[in-house]
Every structure is written in C-alpha cells, then in structure tokens.
Image (cartoon, rainbow, N blue to C red):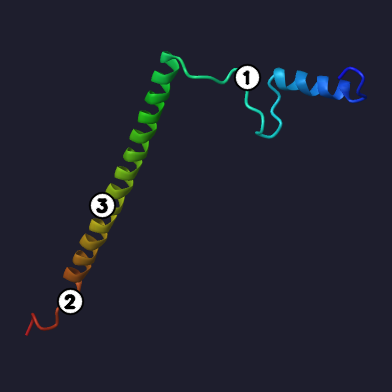
Amino acid sequence: MENTPNNDLINSICDAISSGKNFGGWTDPLDEGLPGPAEAKQRQKNKTAKFKMIQTQEKDRDRFLATTGKKRLDAEIRDNRLKVNTFRNR
C-alpha cells in the first residue's frame, strides 16, 4: 500500500475517522458502545419525563377546550335570557 499514489488520501481519511469526524452518517463514532448503568438510568428518566410532559400538555389542552366550550354555552344561555319575550307581558 505504500507504493500507491493515494496513500496520503487514505491516511487522511483514516485520521479523520479516528478523530470522530462525521462523514454524513455512514461512519459511526468509535466510542459508541453499550451505555453504562448511570447512562441507562438517565436515559430512562429522560424518556419518563418526556412522556409525562406530553401527557400534561394533552391534559391541559383538553381542559382548555372543555372550559372554553362550557363558557361559550353559558354565554349563549345568558344571551337567550336577556332577549325580550314578547309573549310574557300580555
């Protein structure tokens, strides 16, 4: 391999890969491996926190829609009560 003219190119690419350069996703980082116990625990906590946050947002959105619908119906009832009933005063 030392006699090939592209030896410098191969060496520079190998050096870039070993230093962790990202070539658009087709090279994996060399330090990627199984997570340790602390990292696995933290990943699980992050997933749980994300799920709780999404659940809270959905609950808040549903509560908002329910209260706004109820407020609209209450306002409609109040408007109907304020209308003049022409048959009442005969």
In this picture, residue 73 sits left or right of residue 37: left
Kind of residue at badge 2: Val
Q: Residue at x 47, y 18 (%)?
A: 35
- Residue picked out by circle 3: 67
Kind of residue at badge 3: Thr
Residue 26 sits above or below residue 17 on the image:
below
Which one is closest to the eye, mark 2 or mark 1?
1
The disc, 3 or 1, on the residue closer to the chain's N-terminal end is 1
- Residue picked out by circle 2: 84
Q: What's the CA distance linking mark 3 and mark 1? A: 54 Å
- Residue 70: x and y in percent read 23, 57
Front residue (pair 25, 80): 25
Q: Classify mark 1: residues with Cα within 10 Å, few (<14), some (14-19) or many (20+).
A: few
Which one is closest to the eye, mark 3 or mark 1?
1
In this picture, residue 59 sits left or right of residue 45: left
Q: Which mark is residue 30?
A: 1
Say what secondary structure mark 2 lies in: loop
Kind of residue at badge 1: Leu
Front residue (pair 31, 85): 31
The quarter holding residue 3 reads top right
Q: Residue at x 39, y 33 (%)?
A: 50
Which one is closest to the eye, mark 2 or mark 3?
3
- Residue 2: x and y in percent read 89, 17
- Residue 77: x and y in percent read 19, 66
The disc, 2 or 3, on the residue closer to the chain's N-terminal end is 3
